[in-house]
Structure formats: structure tokens, C-alpha cells
Amino acid sequence: MNRPEWEAQHVDDVLPKAAKATGGFASGHAVVIGVANYRNARPLPDSVLNDARDVAAVLKAKEYCGYDERNVHLLLDGDATLERIRAALASVARASGPDDTVAIFFSGHGARLGDPVDPESALLPVECDPRTLDTTSLSEPELSAALQRFDAQRLLVLIDACHSAGAGSFKAAHAAEPPALGYSEKSLGRLAQGTGRVLIASSRASEKSLVFSSARNSVFTSHLLDALRGQAWTRGDGLIRVFEIFNHVSEMVKRQVPGRQHPVFKSNDLEDNFPVVLDRGGVKSTPSPPVSAADPDIWSQLEDIMPDLYPAGPTDQEIWARAGGDPSRLHLNEIGRTTWFRALRALRLGGGGSGIRRQSLIRTALEDYPHHPALASLL
């Protein structure tokens, strides 16, 4: 089967009939929230609202992501009350099924509450009251419970919280001790529990999510939008997947603000680099899927093959070291498929150790599995 035929079949396998009939990503649903003008906090920059508006717009754009506009719920400022956020999440949970993709985006304040060692985090709606945050914020346990009600096996949560340009201390008249702003990484990990759940945060808990005074969008969301508009590296099959989004955003944020902001990826049980949006790159008519050179196809096949052969990750049977790599240069705090995605991304970008190459990795794996035809075909 030649490459264009394979790509067309692959897209057909991923997208339901409704998506192909409408020429869009009919299986996509989204809740997009932006809060800048808090009633009891100093306002955040206008970029917060721009972030939410622009994410919703690019998701609905036929020339980019192809979501049905009826499936994208946008809540800005006065509309982003706790009750309306709850209602939007419940509505999408009812409307989406197991084979659908759900994206939830929040731009605004996050807060860390309770025990400083193991805080409970919360997203802050427009009317949050620092005196009663336990009842006026979207707490981590409540959001986790809401996410558990989704049947969708492809769920992506994006949090761009605590912008440095308006780090929003609460009015002293309302609280002697304002809450610590931001979102703890333990909370992010707890929210990512469950099959097919991915959480991407704009920065580490110790960092601020940066926005420059002259910029329309925050640093994180600016590169997220670029990824959704087709600037991320993809397989060339007409789809943009979750790791491709994170890889692009993470690399570009760290390149733009070196050492100051590091996007965070959390997933507990992810077995599939699932599609999030269509990859149309601004083309208004529906094109044939672009045909890439062999290289991108080899990388995508490696993403499928290596986790099956070495399920514990690049340290399984010391495959990475034997191929000339340095495992200490990899992020190995997870195991399995997620670690392989990250390791192969590092290798593709020239990392993972000075002695390892794609060819050396394939040849070393063939020493263990000499009769693996798919692996042998990649040389």
C-alpha cells in the first residue's frame, strides 16, 4: 500500500463517519474558559481573555482544527461563574462519547489551598471570594469528579494559570492571608488519573506563566495556538496528536524564555498518542492529506513499535544504552509508552546522548528481535 492510501485509511480509522461527512472533526468537544476581571482580585492582563477567545476560534475554524462550533463552549469573565463552569462541563460530559475527544482550556487564576506541603489546588471563577474559597472555587476534588463523568477516552486538560504580569493578590480587606496563587504539580498529577487523560500546564508550580505587556497572548498559549494552526511536527496524516502539541509547546516556550518557564505534562494511563484536532494548517478547502518524506513515517512507526518490544521504556534490556545513548539525559519519571514518546522526540531533536542515532537504535533492537519485519523495514 503506498503512502497516500495508507494515510487516507488511517484517517478513516480515527475519524467517525460524521466527521468525514461534514469535513470536520465532529468528534471534538471543548470547554474554553478565560477569567481576567475578577470581582475580588486585581485584574489579569487582557491577554487572558485573548487566550480563551483565540483557542475557541482556532478550534472552530474549518481551515484549522475543524470542531463543530456547537461543540465549543466559551466562557469569558462574567460568564465564567462557578455554576456556569459546572454546567458547561456537565453538558460536554453528556454530549461526548467514548470515541470522542474532549479539550478543556482554562486561563486565569489558580490557587493552592490548605497544607503547604501537599496543597489542594483550585481554579478560580470570576466571583471567587477569598474568605470562602472552599465554596466559591472549582476545587481539585470537584474537577476530578467532573472529569470522571466523561466517557470520552481522549481527554486533554490545558491550564494556563497565574500570569506574572498580573499575579493578582486578593484585596486585603477581604482576607488577611491571601491564598498562594498557582497550581501544585501533585494536583496536576491527581487530575490526570484515568485512562486516556492528559493534563498540560503552562509552567511548573514554582514558576509564573509569563505574558509580555505588548503580546496578544501568553507565552504558553501563543505556542499552543501555533501548534493547533499546524506548526507542530506531525505524522502528515491530517491529524494533530496530543504529544505533538506538547512537544511543540514545550520546546518553543523553553526556547523563548530559557530557564524561566517549563510546561508540564501529566498522564497516568496513556496508551495512545491520540488525535486532538485536524491538521489543516490554514487551508480553507479540504486538501488531500499531505505526503511527508519517509523520515516522519519512520518516527511514527518507532513510536508504535518500541513500546511493544520494550514495555518498561528505554531502560528495558538497556536498549538505549546499548544503542549508544545516555539514559541520564532522558526524563524517566514515567514508564512505558509515555517515556518512549519523549525519548524518541529527544532523539529526533539530537538529544538522548551523543552516541545514539535512529539507525543505531533500530539495529540494536534488531539484535534482540532479528525476525521483526516492521522493524527491519525501517533501516
Image (cartoon, grey):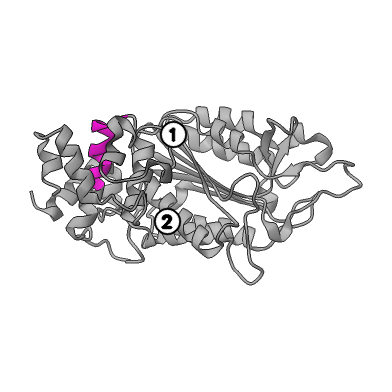
Front residue of 340/121: it is: 340
Residue 53 appears in view: no
* Residue drawn where x is 35% and y is 43% of the image: 341
- Percent x, y for residue 44? 71, 58
* Amino acid type of the residue that numbered disc 2 sits on in the rendered structure: His
> Distance of mark 2 from mark 1, alpha carbons?
20 Å
Using residue 109 as the reference point, say whether residue 225 is left or right of it. Answer: left
Q: Is residue 126 left or right of residue 378?
A: right
Q: Residue at x 13, y 54 (%)?
A: 3
> Does the stretch in magenta take in 307?
yes
In percent of width and height, residue 49 lies at: 62, 59
Please give the label number shown on residue 248: 2
Q: Which residue is mark 1?
A: 334
Q: Crowding at label 2, few (<14), some or many (≥20) Cα neighbours within 10 Å?
A: some
Is most of the magenta stretch helix, strand or loop? helix
Mark in the foreground, 2 or 1: 1
For image coordinates 46% across by 46% down, the residue present is: 71
SS state under label 2:
helix
Q: Is residue 311 above or below residue 377?
A: above
229, above or below 201, in the image: below
259 left or right, relative to 340:
right
Residue 257: x and y in percent read 56, 62
- Which residue type does callout 1 highlight? Glu
The magenta-colored residue range is 300-311
Give residue 126's position: percent from left, percent from top: 72, 47
Q: Say whether residue 285 is left or right of residue 73.
A: left
Q: Are marks 2 and 1 in contact (CB under 8 Å)?
A: no
- Per the image, label 1 sits on a secondary structure element best described as loop
